[in-house]
Amino acid sequence: MIIKARRNYKQVELLEALKHRTDLTSHQLDLLRHLKETTLLEQHFELYLSALDMDNIDVIWQFNYSDYHQDALINLVLISNDGIYLFKLNNYSGLHYINHHGMLADYFTDEVKIDLVHLNCVKYSIYNILDPRLKQLPIIIKCVCLNDRFALDGHASKQHFLFKNDIAAYLSQIKGSHKKKTRIIAEMIHDFHHVSDNISFQSVKKGLRCPSCQLISDFNCHQRLFLCLSCRTIISIDQLFVQAAKEYLLIYPDRKMTKSAMYQWCNKKIPPAKIALLLKQHFKNEGRTKGTYYLELNIP
Ligand SMILES: [Zn+2]
C-alpha cells in the first residue's frame, strides 16, 4: 500500500515563482537545481516499482529526516515483513571509491558524496523509534546509482549499492505477506517524517510572469489577449492571471488573496473589474462582500 505517494516538490514551484521576482541565494539556486534533478530520478525509479507487490509492501516516498546536524532525504522507503529498505537515488558518474571514513567519494577529486552518511543516519534513527519487539527486523540501505557511467572501485564493498541494471531483479525479490506488524511500522515511520521546507526571501517583484520566456515582463493587452514585450508570445489573460495568482498563494500562504491584492500584484496591468471576474471564474470565494478573498479551486 502506498502510505505516502511521490509528489512534486512544493519548493520547486515556489523557487521557480521567486526566481524572477527576487534574488535567490546561491544556496537556493543549488536547491532548485538539485530538487529538479531529484524529481527526474524519482520518476525514473518509480517505473521499476510497477512489478512490486503493492498489496503487501508499504511504500513511503520522500522521507525527510532532520536533526541538528543535517537534513537527509531518503527518496523511497519500502516496508515488507522481511525488512525495511531505504533507497537514496543518485546520478553520479565516473569512478568512485569508499574512503577511510566509510564515505562514498569521487576517485579523482576525493569529493565526498553524502549518500551513505544520510542512509546510515536515517537507518539508526528509524531503529531507535522501533518498538523493542521489532528491532530484529533488518534495515537495509541502498545507494541507488541510476547513471550508466557510475563505477565503483573494485576493492569497495558493493553491499550498500544498487546499480541500474540490477534494480529490477533486486526489487522483485522483496516479498511481503500482509501482516499488521509491518503496517504499524510504516505508519510509525511516516509519522516520524520531518519536513523542513522553509525558504526565506526578501523583496519580491510584483507583476505578471510570461509562461513562455518566464520573465516578469511588460505586456500589451488587447481584449483577452496579452502580448509579451520580451519574447512576443501571445498569452490569454486567463492563463497569465491564474499563474500570477497561484504564485501569490505559493509565495504568501498567510495572506488573503483579495481583489485589491491581486490588482497590486499584477502591477495594475489588469483593471479591477476584470480581476474580480477572473477571480470568480478560476478561484473559490470565501467571506462576504468587502472581506471577500479567494482560494485555489482544487485544494484538497
Ligand atoms: Zn515572454
Image (cartoon, rainbow, N blue to C red):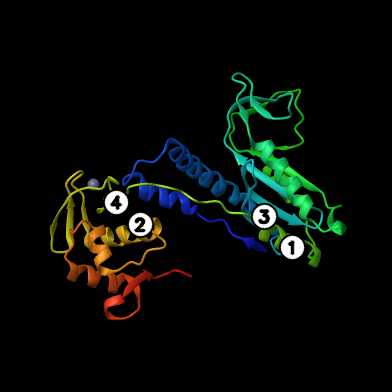
Cα distance in 3D space between marks 1 and 3: 12 Å
Decide if ligand 1 comes within 8 Å of the CB at mark 4.
yes
Decide if ligand 1 comes within 8 Å of the CB at mark 3.
no
Name the amino acid type tagged 2.
Glu
Disc nearer the start of the sequence (3/4): 3
Give the label, 3 or 4, closer to the camera: 4
Q: Which residue corresponds to the image point at 28% horizontal and 74% vertical from the top-left?
A: 280
User: Which residue is identified by label 4?
Assistant: 211
**Looking at the picture, how far across and down is residue 51, in whole percent?**
67, 54
Name the amino acid type tagged 1.
Asn
* Crowd around label 1: few <14 · some 14–19 · many ≥20 (10 Å): some
Disc nearer the start of the sequence (2/3): 3
Disc nearer the start of the sequence (1/2): 1
Residue 202 appears in the figure: yes
User: Which residue is identified by label 1?
Assistant: 56
Cα distance in 3D space between marks 4 and 1: 43 Å
Name the amino acid type tagged 3.
Ala
**Looking at the picture, how far across and down is residue 219, in whole percent?**
17, 52
Disc nearer the start of the sequence (1/3): 3
The answer to whether the residue labelled 2 contacts the one labelled 4, judged by CB atoms less than 8 Å apart, is no
Q: In the picture, which quadrant includes the N terminus?
A: bottom right
Name the amino acid type tagged 4.
Pro
